[in-house]
Each structure stands twice: as C-alpha cells, then as structure tokens.
Amino acid sequence: MSAGAGARGGARWSGSGLRGCGGRTAAGGAGEQCSGWRAVPLIRLVYLLLALRWHAMPSTSRDVADTAYVRRLNAQRVLTALRAGSAMSASELISATGMSRPTVHAAARHLIDLGWVAEAAADHGTSAPRRGRPSRVFAFRADAGHVLGIDVGAHTARAVLADLRGESVAERQITFDDPDVEARRRIALVRDLAAGTVHDAGFGPGHVLSVCVGTSGTISEAGVVRVRTGIPGFLDVDLRTAMAEGFGWHVTVENDCNLAAVAERWRGTAAGTEDFLCLLAGERLGVGVFTGGTLLRGHHNKARDLSFLKLMPGATLDGIGLLARRRGAELVAGPARRRTARTPRAAAAVLHDLVDGDPERVDAEAVFRAVREGDKAAAGILDQALDSTARAVATLSMILAPELVVVSGAVAAAGDVLLEPLRRAVGRIVDDVPRLAASPLTHRAVVTGALHHALQHTEGRYLDALAEAPSGVRP
C-alpha cells in the first residue's frame, strides 16, 4: 500500500467520532483489518452501558426508580408554580402544569409532607370560578424558613431577616463607636446584631436556613478576607467560621460590591440589564461587574479590583462620600471661610451655615445639601470628589463597554447632584459615555444582595433538592 493509500485507509476524525477503515486499524497495526467497523461516539457507548445496566435490573427495581423519578418531577413542577405566585387551586395548578388532578393532588401532598406547601382556604387568593364542589387550594410556605443577610462595614453593620420570597420580616442596624474597633470585637457585635434580628421576628437560630455576610475586600472561597479591605484589622479574618459558630448556620461570605451588583439586577435599576457596572463609592471606591448577564469574578475573585487607579497621578481609591466629607471640613475650617462667613451667599456660606461653622459636623450629606442650595464652593468640592470615580468609570467603559453604570450605596441618595457632574467628568475622558443611574436601594444595596445570595443557597440545598424542611421550621 502506498503512503497516500495508507493515509486514506487509516483513521480519520468525523463529526460522529473516530472511524477506522480501509484495511488497517486506527492504530495502524499491520494485518489488523477493520472489516467495516465503525467506532461509535463515547456518549453512545455510555448510553449503551446504561441501557444494559437498566435492563439487567429486576423489573420491580426499574418500576420503583421510574416512580420515584416521576414523582420528583411532578413535585418540582407544582412547587415551581406555587413559588411563582400566590395560592393556587388544584384547577389552576392543572392548567399551569398540564398534569392531571390526581397527579397534582399527589404532588401537593408530597410537598405538604416535606413542609414547603400548605393547604389554604378554598377562597384564599385564587382566581378560579367557584362552581360546584370547591377545589382544593395550595400555597407555598414562604414562612417555612428564613434567610439572613448581613452587611458589615467600617462604620455600620446592618442585618435583615427575610422569608423565602425575600420579603423582610425584621431588620436591625448598629453603628460602631470606633471605626478602628478590633476585629474580634467587631465580629462579636455583628453576631449579637444577627441574633437580635432573628429574635425580633420571634424565631430561634434553627429557623434560619442560610446566611450571607457581605464585606469589603477580596473573599476566598473559604469565606476568608484575603486582599484589601476598608475595615481595619479584617485581613485574614475567617468570617464564615466566626458567624456560624454556636448558631449552626450555613454561612457564605461575599464581597460587598458583588452583592450590590446582584441586588441591582434583582430589585434595582439594573433589572433585565446584561452588561453593567455597580459602583460603591461611599468610604472607598469599589465595583461589581455583570457582563453577558454573569457576575464577573476572575481568578481568586479579584476581577473587580480598582488598584489600576494607583497608576494615575492624583487618583485615589477613596470614595465620594469620604472625599466630600474631608474636603468640606477643610473648607469650613479654612481661613478664607472665616473671612467671608458673614457675606451672604459667599463661597461655602451655605455649607458653613448648615454645620454652624463646626468642621466636625461636616458629612457628605451636608455637602450634597449645600450643592442643592447653590453653594458654588461645595459644588467645586463635589467635582474634586468625583474625579477618581470618573477615571474608574471611563477606564472600565473602554474595556468592558457596559450599557449602564449604577452608583450604589448611601451616596446614591444624592443622585440628583452627583450624576450630571459625573457624566461631564467621564465625557472629558471618553466619547461614548454609558448611561448613568443612581440606585433606588441606596444604603440597603449590599444587604439586599446578601439576601438574594442566601436565598439562592437555600433553594439549592432545600427547595430544588426537595429536601425536608428542617424540624425547627416544620408546621
């Protein structure tokens, strides 16, 4: 056989797998004829082996497996329909799922036994016509368990307890007297905050199915703060273990900027948006990124690091709120301010009056209010405070081309005075400025994202798996 014939007669790859043909085997062994053999794709071999194993099972075993699988599918379809809305009659479930009445009743009974569904009164929130014998009505038990979202910052911490539809049932917030409080003390205060929030709703720790803690810095998969954090002493803190100890909770820890972005897509201004940036810009600058509808994480969850600002002269990682507060205090305390304190509408006169001339009383909100009331010096402060934010937005826009940029966190409440100067500042750097918006969630953005994260884990561990509700939350 010639070399060309050997090549033609050897193995070749096709769309359906490796085929050996034409005289020699695919391995090219002499004298081993293919005899028309065709190797099937690997997936077909797997199916064949599974089929052989299936048919080798006793018929009773196959029947039990079939029944259990179908029963599970039916229950999932009913649970999905009930979770999507309010109480539904059996007739409405039949229409929604395409299943028969006996099958719907059997699936609902199974879900009731698991603790996730309850039978409601016949007229409870359904739209079914009332003719003849009343139809049975079922409802998802949103109170069958709860999730806890926690936002830990340098100055404050907030905890929200929500039901399985994500609706808040209890909330608490604390302010740290000393932002530099030692990490162990901060964690102890946050644990008390979490336990108190659950207690306010009348529940014990066993009623909490999942907890998500949001904080600044890069978080490892083990829930340890690893890289740059705005909270003193929090590097290498194992938040997952610290928050779960003694409570028995399933705890996840996530970066606060990522959670703010998740919240915006869930219940904020980025709902339905595939590509957007979410900026937290209070005490420090941070960003959460969605691209193609997926949260961008990168290697070791470091994708949202804005440290490239260190390469830009004059730029800083300090947030809008911190810079406005700091520069506003300097303006009120400065000698130029004291010389013009009695001049009507002089530079910084409004800001000076708002804080009674006391630099210690200047905060970001005072600066924003002064801008609203026409204080030109305060407006100048705001332009300076927005400079680094504009550079970050412009740089990320050139790389990621987002449709939307959301300013989130507490400073979002000042969107009426922030967005236009930010838009102008970004426009001085790039020609194509993305749409800018202020988050309606403001200071609740991170904790709202934490609730969504905790709900997702609860769905995976309990609802999607059709596991029994824990004994502590059964009716």
Image (spheres, helix red, strand yellow):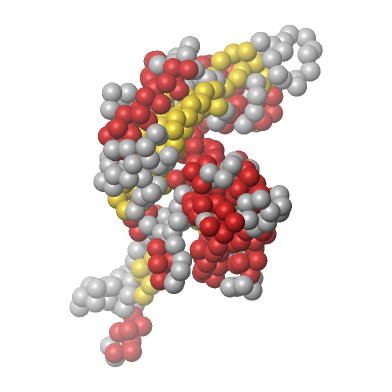
Q: Position of residue 85 (x, y in %)?
A: 64, 28
Q: Position of residue 354 (x, y in %)?
A: 62, 43
Q: Position of residue 429 (x, y in %)?
A: 58, 73
Give whichever of 70, 352 is nearer the camera. 352
Tally the numbered discs.
0
Give whichever of 421, 462 is nearer the camera. 421
Q: Position of residue 10 (x, y in %)?
A: 31, 78
> What residue is shown at x 79% (from left), y 12% (from top)?
131
> What residue is shown at x 40% (from left), y 63% (from top)?
307
| Image quadrant where residue 347 sits | bottom right
Q: Is residue 308 visible?
A: yes
Give the vertical position of 195 relative to 166 (above or below). Answer: above
> What residue is shown at x 37% (from left), y 24% (from top)?
192
In the displayed structure, does residue 328 sit left or right of residue 272? left
Give whichever of 447, 281 is nearer the camera. 281
In the displayed structure, does residue 414 sit left or right of residue 238? right
Most extreme residue toward the left is 30
| Viewport quadrant of the N terminus | bottom left
| Image quadrant where residue 120 sits | top right
| Image quadrant where residue 275 sits | bottom right
Give the vertical position of 185 relative to 389 (above or below). Answer: above
> What residue is shown at x 45% (from left), y 23% (from top)?
197
Q: Is residue 262 visible?
A: no
